[in-house]
Amino acid sequence: MCLGWQPCAYVRPAPYRHPRTARWWSPEDIAAFKKRTEALADQYSSFEPLKGMHVNGVVRNVDARYGAFDVKPGAKLYLPPDQRVHIW
């Protein structure tokens, strides 16, 4: 997963590279970011509301949605808090 004009969020492309900003995330930050983005990608791939139909399940990770729409355990788009992915 990458951000905006950057082909990768933690390493700037050569034309924009500057010695002080070429690698601006620590190895621990990079590992945590990769772990979270992989978890989010797995959620996207596994959400199947109808057999054979996969859709974007990212809305399940938005905590505010649960209170705003009174989403409770057992609802099709409910995701327990410990399984919700927060990238930032």
Image: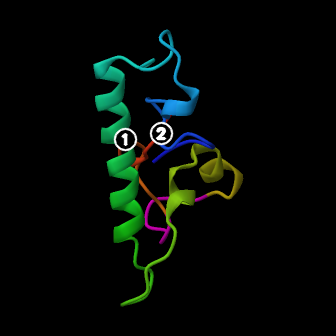
Q: How is the image coloured?
A: rainbow
| Residue 44, percent from left and from top | 42, 64
Question: Quick one: which residue is furthest to the bottom in this view?
Answer: 51
Q: Between tags 2 and 1, which lies in front?
A: 1
**Secondary element at image label 2:** loop
What is the crowding at mark 1: few (fewer than 14 residues within 10 Å), some, or many (at least 20)? some
Mark 2–mark 1 distance (CA, rounded to whole Å)? 7 Å
The image's mark for residue 21 is: none
The part of the chain drawn in magenta is 71-77
Q: Main secondary structure of the magenta part?
A: loop
How many numbered badges does the structure rendering display? 2
Residue 76 lies, with reference to residue 88, above or below; the image says below
What is the crowding at mark 2: few (fewer than 14 residues within 10 Å), some, or many (at least 20)? few
Q: What is the three-letter code of the residue carrying label 2?
A: His
| Residue 20, percent from left and from top | 50, 9
Which residue is under mark 1? 36
**Secondary element at image label 1:** helix
Residue 76 forms part of the magenta stretch: yes
Q: Is residue 36 left or right of residue 57?
A: left
| Residue 75, percent from left and from top | 49, 68
Q: What is the three-letter code of the residue carrying label 1?
A: Arg
* Residue drawn at point x = 51 percent, y = 50 percent: 61
Q: Is residue 43 left or right of residue 6?
A: left
**Contact between labelled residues 1 and 2, with CB atoms less than 8 Å apart:** yes
Q: Nearer the viewer, residue 1 or 56?
A: 1
Which residue is under mark 2? 86
* Residue drawn at point x = 55 percent, y = 39 percent: 6
* Residue drawn at point x = 36 percent, y = 23 percent: 29
Question: Quick one: which residue is furthest to the top in this view?
Answer: 20
Q: Nearer the viewer, residue 25 or 36?
A: 25
Q: Nearer the viewer, residue 50 or 24?
A: 24
